Amino acid sequence: MMEPVLTVENLSVRIAGLHILQGVSFPVAPTGVTVLLGRNGVGKTTTLRAIVGLTPRNGEVRGTIRMGAQSLLARPTYRLVRNGLGYVPEDRCVFAGLTVAENLRLAERRGAEAAYDRVFALFPELERRARQRAGSLSGGQQQMLAIGRVLLNENRLLLIDEPTKGLAPKVVTEVTEVLERVAESMPVLLVEQNLAVVRRLAKDAVVLAAGQVAWAGDAQELLLETALTKSLLGVGTGEPHRGPEQAAATGKDAN
Amino acid sequence: MLATRGLTWRIGEVAIVDGVYLDLAPGEFLGVIGPNGAGKTSLFNLITGLRRATDGRVLLDGKDITDLPPHRRAWLGLGRTFQASSVFGSLSVRENVRLAVQAHRGGSMKLWRRAAADREVAAAADAALDRVGLAHRGTALAGTLAHGEKRKLEIALLLAGEPRVMLLDEPMAGVSAEDVPELVAVIRSLTGESGRSVLMVEHHMDVILELADRIAVMHHGALLACDTPETVMANATVQEAYLGESL
Amino acid sequence: MTEVKSPEVPAPPAAVPAELTPQPGRWHRVRPYLPLVALLVAAILPYSTLQLPGIFEGPLNSPGTLQLLAICLIFGGLAAGYDLLFGRTGMLSFGHALYFAAGVYGTDILVTRAGLPLWQAALLTITGGAILAALLGAVALRTVGIAFAMVTLAFAQVGAILVARDFGGLTGGEEGLPLDVSGLPDALVGVTNTVNLYWLALAYLAVVVFVVHRVSGSPTGRVLAGLRDDERRIGVLGLDPYRYKLVAFTLAGGLAAAGGVVYCLIVGGASPHITSSELTLSLLVMVVLGGPGTRWGPVLGGILYMYLDHRLTAFGTSDAVDSLPAVLSRPLSQPLFVLGTIFILAVYFFPGGLAGLTSRLTLLRRSLRLPTPRSPR
Amino acid sequence: MGTVILLTLTGLGLAALYFLVASGLSLVFGLADVLNFAHGLFLGVGAYATWWAAGNLPGAGPDGFGFVLAVAFGVAAGTLVAVLVELVLIRPLYSRTIEQVLVTVGLSLAGVALLQATWGADARPFPRPEWTRGVTGILGAQVPNGGLLLIIAAVLVLGALLAFLQWTRYGLVIRAGVENREMVTALGIDVRKAFTLVFAIGGAAAALAGALGGVYFGTVSPGQGSSLLIFAFIVVVIGGMGSVLGSAYAAVAVGLLQQFVNYYGTSGLGDICVVGLLAAVLLLRPQGIAGKVATA
Amino acid sequence: ATACGSPQDTASGGGDSAAPVKVGLVYSQSGALASYGKQYIEGFKAGLDFATKGTNKVGDRAIEITEADDAGDPAKAVSAAKDLIGKGTKIIAGSTASGVALQVAPIAAQNKVLFISGPAATDAVTGANKYTFRSGRQSYQDVVTAKSFIGDPTGKKVVVFAQDGAFGDANEAAVKTVIGGAGATVSSVRAPASATEFTPFASQIKAAKPDLLFVAWAGTTAPAMWQTLDQQGVLSSTTVVTGLDIRASWPTFGAAGSKISFLSHYFDGASDTEAAKALKAKVGTVDLFHPDGFAAAQMVVRAVQEGGDDVDKMVTALEGWSFDGIKGKMTIRAEDHALLQPMYQAKLTGSGTEFTASAQKSLTGDETAPPAVAMKG
Ligand SMILES: Nc1ncnc2c1ncn2[C@@H]1O[C@H](COP(=O)(O)OP(=O)(O)OP(=O)(O)O)[C@@H](O)[C@H]1O
Ligand SMILES: Nc1ncnc2c1ncn2[C@@H]1O[C@H](COP(=O)(O)OP(=O)(O)OP(=O)(O)O)[C@@H](O)[C@H]1O
Ligand SMILES: [Mg+2]
Ligand SMILES: [Mg+2]
């Protein structure tokens, strides 16, 4: 096997006294999509945020996280991101008060060409709504913006947290296709509840349970073994399943 | 039971919700689907009074409630959940539900009684928690719950209010696959009781198809169709606008 | 019409009111009696001749010490009342000083200018203070967040201007209005009777703490806590946020006015200092210093703040400071310099306020007793 | 007629002073989300540093180029203090708004006391060019030159700030960082730099206000900054938090209102009217004149 | 020491004829009036030295001074006074601010201790009660001095320009009585104390075309006010009279300084008495409030000399007493304890930061005597 792009070893996170991750270890392959699975509240988001250095201030992280030979722990988030770690958060976090264009402009990096054509080709909606304030976009539109923002730059690894949450089936398909194309050129660590999406994208899978890695290996293998999936994820995968796991839009919009 | 008459909400020139006529019969379960940005959440906001309609009326039991503030509508039996979980983060889970029960039992000012002493309220709250399977998290602070757990708490808050018309905004969002059937069962049981009506937005078609008596499809703020699930699913426009090609 | 959300209020750090989360433990059974014990100790304090050099000028039973303690107690109560708004309901009012000032000036004017007996003046003032709070609150509560803070500040500012303008010579303008003690009960007049004022202040504090405790443990108190977290949700549950906020605002205003009555007696008059917006800011400082939303935090914060405010003047002129080199002694002889520096340090060293200190100490103690096992590997 | 012109122009001068104080406050308040009660301190530092430079700095003086140099020194000092305050005191407290209020309140108390300890409580005569003491006849009104100077400075500052926010990348970062600091970092931007910058700008504007205020008042005293602060806060709120343009409108409204009511009404009524204006604006438009309509 | 005592203990002063006499000085060491306070205390020490001939003793009893800072806040002053009284102090002096003096005075009366108010200029201290005296001048005396600038007031038009509030009210009332009573028509222009822009008021004054403008303005905005009056041509169009403040403020008048007629309580060189020489030898440059401290010390020594520990005797000893102070002959009027003293007309010359004041004329204590008021308590 090729050298992993990211290695998580014995990662342990406590937040406000709760021991959320208790010694999680897994590699992320240098190509394709590695998907992180697990029930609600098991700590998937916590894992991604620990990798990108966004654990809340009352939290404590132990263990090692390495990208190549470089340790990522204790380095400020903005440096990690500049070094090629792209992050799309669970609740999207677009800047509600800025326009779509400004949201994108913010993601530009000094000294690097911003790939606007790639983003607009994937999400033509963003180009049309360039002057609309991001806060007034619908949930799905905001998700597109959040993904678009990170695709503006070349990254060594993308961390994406539940990108299809709250998206209409049609948009889920679109986003999945986009991610599939993205994964051709860069590795992705994906948190996803929608098993249909997982089936389509994932090469490797890591399943978390009770704060630890319960299973790791080939994703398609996992999905084929109904019994295994059932025991790990609590659902059968006998037939293509438009998962109920599709989550809803959160964030600052609507309501 | 609940009806909207040409309900419209404009921001500037744009109609976010565009002349919606809806009728919800007692005991009926109406699913609402539509692409992202179709105006589903906005419609809920208009019905519950969080936003003021620019045009049109909302009727509950034939009574015009368009100009009532949110809490008055709640008294009349209108309850909702939020798409983005909105629970009382600094209260414990149990306190959250107790507050909802208390609100339902009449919001008179009680400054001098001990809240904890009210056994009836506590019992009702625990019952609601039990129903969504959160009883074991009763003492946790609601703010520290994982996303999925907050969704359940949202529903418990709604249950505690015993509303006659319930508006559920993507209740399944972020709920573990494992827990979905359980939650679906809870929601179904709601409708069975005493002619309660439900209006539910959900992107998850399985759930909608399983629960809904009728499905309304929204697109660009307007009501595209409102019919039985079979008819709606067969509708070509709906296919094209919402479902897209299957994965 | 679109609903508009005003920019974020600095939401008070969420704290669960102690009375809403039962805490099991060894102390469980003793706890309810601790406040009573504290009250008792405070009540018999004036019988002690204990000298606390450096902390108080004279023995505990000397009038100077009792006067200082009485002022501290008043502000302890005032801060606790303010916390009902800020820590428990999440309303950031910048005009709370107005209701306190209304209490002080109301009593003073009714006694000195109108010649009413004290009890009538006090009753009228407290009622008047609550009504004033209700009226102004009814207007101010139409806004939320920073806007609310600013409207309350503006009302308080009008109060300050009116006092300074001295209409009809009623308030004495910037010179203030000394209280005419001729109609007062003898027990409240004269240095030898300072102890009675002390007890009065203690009683006020006890009442405020009891009321705030009772109210925040009541069903209404729970709604207030809910309002602090999510007002919109409260509305959808079927409760009128406005009504509840107005009740809290009025109650807090009434409590502040009552504090003003006692303060007027203790200080023997009214002066425009108490109408300044700085006083409200100090209230905020007291509450945050102590720990918002906790039962004892604001009380301790208020007491400590006032103690420092009064004692630092003595510290600044003490020989110890004078003998320092000028670079140090000059700033140190400015009480406000020391007070300001203390706030800043307090923020860094006691996050969560004094009330947070106990839990931090418990944590420390626990970790000393059983060190957390580091995970192997 | 002369009176109206006189009142208008002096009112605008007052407005310019309010704007200079309020603009920095508004930026820090609206964008970095810090209710900066220490803003008055920056003002005081700017004023005292200018005063000191005019007397002690080689090349600086009370007139001509020397005065410009002294003001530049004052602005630099104010900026420096603001940056230090941000780096040392505010930075560890981002996202803890209440603690920030506490720290800035503490700072304003301690800082003003420190000025007083160093230079005494009494007002000191402020160095100022001869020209600013005079008046200019405009349509029969004798308009004080000090006020005119303030107006010019305020217009320049307004233009510079608007251009900065709208057209520079830092302006964009600042606007985004206010909403979600974490997410700005997650886009690979060191957001802390932006907040330091906001403080530097705020400090510079305040210091300039302090220096020009010194010219206007003719004296400098430790409490000067704090006494202007309350009106500055009112201006910020009426104008809408974080909106520089809004602050400008509001400052003009407040300055003119105060001036005219003080002349035609009775004394003290001007202040009450300003407060009334604040209440009215907030009740009708809680987000202020130019405030953003946040989507809830 | 015992740990128990009565809560109503206060140390009893004296009894022992050789015990030191305790004198409490409560004045502003910090806060806005700190520099007034500094002059006061320097003057007091020089005065004590002068009156006891360097021994600091009256008979064989040493004078023991305790200083307390009130920071200009009446509440702090009251606390300090109560503390001192509780410790057996029979004489309290100080009070830099009027508000402080007015609230300490009743405390003195309630506890039967001697109170000698300091620089506080409010007329209300005069005749406040039997135990209250003053060692400085009062507003009324300023106004009488101002009147001396216009010769015969009959038919003249006088405008008072003053701040809102009690200080302004008092000055306006005094001008109406003194100058208006002598036949002039008096009107007033009032401005809020917080005003920063004075053009509207200058315009109003100019429109009134007065023969005499009396300005009563205190605070840091004074220089801006003078500059505006100058710029709008008020100073050159009429006689403008105001009180001469402390030296530090002289340069802030700028060019306006030479166009104003000053009435003065005191400035360096205004008198050439023995006391003034002694003071000058001690403090170098004499300033406005040095004489107040000096006179207070003289009064304290007189009170102790004649009264011992008996406050009532002290009062009797002071009432009607005349003595040679810094300013010349000073008389304590028996009826209302007004301190009759010489006042001065002065002119300011110089430029930049170098200004000197010179006396134009001095008025005797009788010429500037305020009308007697009835003793209130
Ligand atoms: N700031 C916090 N304070 C306390 N507990 C927290 C905090 N953030 C997360 N947790 C807890 O950590 C656990 C894991 O949360 P996390 O958000 O990582 O779950 P998740 O796997 O992403 O769940 P979901 O599928 O619902 O998004 C949850 O039980 C949650 O309650
Ligand atoms: N305050 C607002 N200002 C401007 N536009 C708004 C506002 N609120 C909502 N919108 C717009 O209204 C449309 C409908 O939004 P809404 O949130 O109701 O959609 P939705 O159907 O709930 O979508 P989703 O499924 O993604 O949650 C969107 O295009 C959104 O951009
Ligand atoms: Mg998650
Ligand atoms: Mg929605």
Image (cartoon, coloured by chain):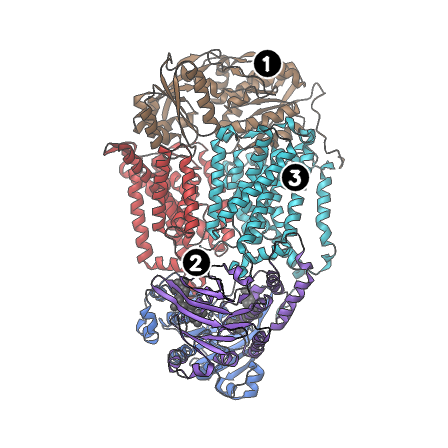
Circle 1/circle 3 CB separation < 8 Å: no
Chain C image colour: cyan
Q: Secondary structure at mark 3?
A: helix
Shade representing chain B: purple
Q: Are marks 3 and 2 in contact (CB under 8 Å)?
A: no
Of the two numbered discs 3 and 2 on the same chain, state the one appearing first in sequence: 2
- Whether discs 1 and 3 lie on one chain: the answer is no
CA gap between label 1 and label 3 equals: 39 Å
Q: Amino acid at mark 1?
A: Glu
The answer to which image quadrant residue A148 occupies is bottom left
Above or below, E134 relative to B170: above
Which residue is found at the position 59% from the left and 45% from the top? Answer: C79
Q: Colour of chain E?
A: brown
Spatial CA span between label 3 and label 2: 45 Å
* Residue E239, above or below E67: above
Q: Which mark is residue E319?
A: 1
Q: Residues within 10 Å of mark 3 (few under 14, many from 20)?
A: many
Chain A colour in the picture: blue
